[in-house]
Amino acid sequence: MSAVQLPVRTQAELALIERADHAGSLGDDRRQEALDILRQHGLPSRRVEAWHYTDLRALLGRQPAVAEGEAEASFLTPFLPHSVVVDLGRGAAGNDVERGVAVTQGYGAPSLAGTANRLDRDHDTVRVLNAALGAGASTVTIAADTEVDKPIELRALPQRGGSQGASTVKLGARAMAVIVERAPPEGAGAVSTAVHTLELGEGSDILWIVVQEKGFDEAHLAQLNVRCEADAKFRMFVLNAGGAVIRQEVHVETAGEGAAIIIRGVNLLADKQHVDVTTTLNHNAANTTSTEIFRNVVLGGHGVFQGVIRVAKGAQKTDARLACNTLLLSDDGDFSAKPELEIFADDVQCGHGATAGEINPDHLFYLMSRGIPQAQARALLVKAFVDEVVEEIEHEAAVEALEARIDEWLAVER
């Protein structure tokens, strides 16, 4: 008789399994399936290609124990003024839902099997953790031809061990909206997850803003899956300004001609942080466009950018470009960039690139020669480096709020 040897689980894996065991009723089939996968397969290591630069098995092992007490109160304040706040799994909070906007509990959850970047295991790690930890979920439906005046903020209810949120957001044809996805601090040792699905109807237009400001002893794993129908416009801005272990995945598919993808992001890294942004832009229809630019400021820790543009056979006239630009301001930090192209059509314009370096000494000398102190001159150059992509957002209140957050981060002495 042969015995099956079960893999040895790390303390981080055992702690997550125990946390998932107490996350809610095991009567939920999806959560039970995810928990079984977590027990059987554990967390990915660098041997899994999708997690090669982010060894989750080792990184979560550095997390401290969950702190006692309540979650941080920063959840209570909307990021943008006059926002409609949606408590995932419950509905709208604080304000009535806007005209043409419906919020219902539950959502059409993406399958745990299969992965958008095709490099994970037989199941999607972020989705498994989100389901196993008992995510609260909502569906937000915006009617056709509706222009939502107020931003809609998605909020997973704070938990001492970390919030777990999920949603499906559906925009009807020619609808317009601004969505804010926030990840504020919750407490030492928290592990939070978020899985969102966005369906853009024909000719719709959305600005999706991600603001991640976790504490420097917290982990946050997030995923956004987007499908764009004909002439839909998906605009996104990502700000990572905190967290000990961060993984932000963005997977976008163009399903109709004329669809456009515009992604901008800023990663601010300090000592001992690990921030990973992984994106896939899948062009499956002809005459579609995408541009993606991330700017990274590294004072310490380790940053990762994995960006793939895929152009399917028949997706002719695709125009797609991505860039990752990094300022390395300390010997204590590093950044790994992996931009890729996979092109199966012959009439396309595609490009990708990555740069890394220090502040241009000529620019620094110019400012100092005008009487600006060196520290202030460096700060001005760093701010100009990141503000260039922030200012591309076509939303004045969002630009002001994001620039204020970036200024606060840059002002802290490290």
Image: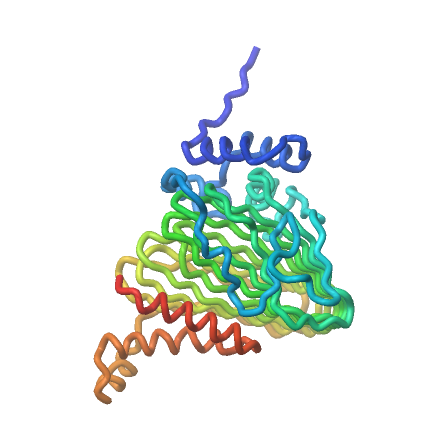
Residue 186 picture location, percent across and down: 44, 49
**Is residue 123 left or right of 408 when viewed as pictured?**
right
At x 72%, y 63%, the residue is 101
* Occupied quadrant, residue 356: bottom left
Residue 99 picture location, percent across and down: 73, 67
Q: Nearer the viewer, residue 170 or 382?
A: 170
Q: Nearer the viewer, residue 41 or 39?
A: 39
How many numbered badges does the structure rendering display?
Answer: 0
**Is residue 40 positioned above or below 176 on the image?**
above
Residue 231 picture location, percent across and down: 73, 73
Q: In the orientation shown, which residue stands out farthest toward the bottom? A: 370
Q: Nearer the viewer, residue 395 or 318?
A: 395
At x 42%, y 49%, the residue is 245
Q: State which quarter of the image contains the N terminus.
A: top right
At x 43%, y 76%, the residue is 387
**Is residue 306 left or right of 111 when viewed as pictured?**
left
**Is residue 284 positioned above or below 128 on the image?**
below
* Occupied quadrant, residue 386: bottom left
At x 50%, y 34%, the residue is 19
Q: Nearer the viewer, residue 413 or 47?
A: 413
